[in-house]
Image (spheres, rainbow, N blue to C red):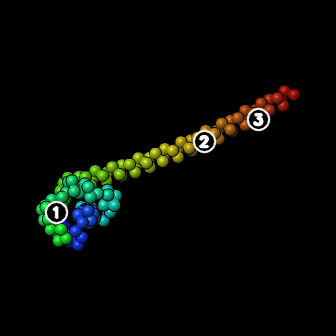
Amino acid sequence: MHLDAADNNPAVRDEMLAAKMVLAADQVIDEQLYPGEGRSKIVNIDAEYLRAHCKGLTYPVSDTASMGKEFYVQLVFDKKFRDEVERRYSQIVGWDHLQQLGDMAAISLAMLGGVYIYLRMTAAKSAARMELEETAAKT
């Protein structure tokens, strides 16, 4: 990955580098690892993870050397990166399925509660009607 930093401010250069690193990782995920699935939007790999686990060689080597000139960073997307993408994707899909299951359970309980209330009301009306019929038959 190549960064042509026009600003001498290291913070600005680091922000630009972070954005380009995330963009490169998203492209690798969407175009090479899992084409057509859009997983990069789901797993949301951040610049901190890329700096800690995927950043390879940099040129120039010193962070303060050659300010305002071209800056190169090598990103290494290995099996650990693929495993992290798969782990994050599985975790998010699992949480989504768990939420759907919880929603279905809540709806089922609400329906069961409705049926229970209906049966209680109809049973009470039937009992009252039977009592009325018994008192009417006695008189």
Report the residue at 22% width, 56% height from top.
Answer: 51
Sooner in the amino-acid sequence: mark 2 or mark 1: 1
Query: In front: 134, or 66?
Result: 66
Circle 1: element type: loop
Circle 3: element type: helix
Q: Position of residue 4 (x, y in %)?
A: 20, 71
- Labels 2 and 1 touching (C-beta < 8 A): no
Q: Position of residue 24 (x, y in %)?
A: 24, 65
Report the residue at 26% width, 62% height from top.
Answer: 11
- The residue labelled by disc 1 is 64
Q: Residues within 10 Å of mark 1 (few under 14, many from 20)?
A: few
- The residue labelled by disc 3 is 129
Against 51, residue 128 (above or below) is: above
- The residue labelled by disc 2 is 115
- How far apart in space, not on screen, are marks 3 and 1 (Cα)? 92 Å
Residue 106 got which mark? Answer: none
The three-letter code of the residue at mark 1 reads Thr
Which mark is in front, 2 or 1?
1
Query: In front: 50, or 100?
Result: 50
Query: In front: 5, or 75?
Result: 5
The quadrant in which the C terminus is found is top right
Q: Quadrant of residue 85?
A: bottom left
Against 113, residue 12 (above or below) is: below
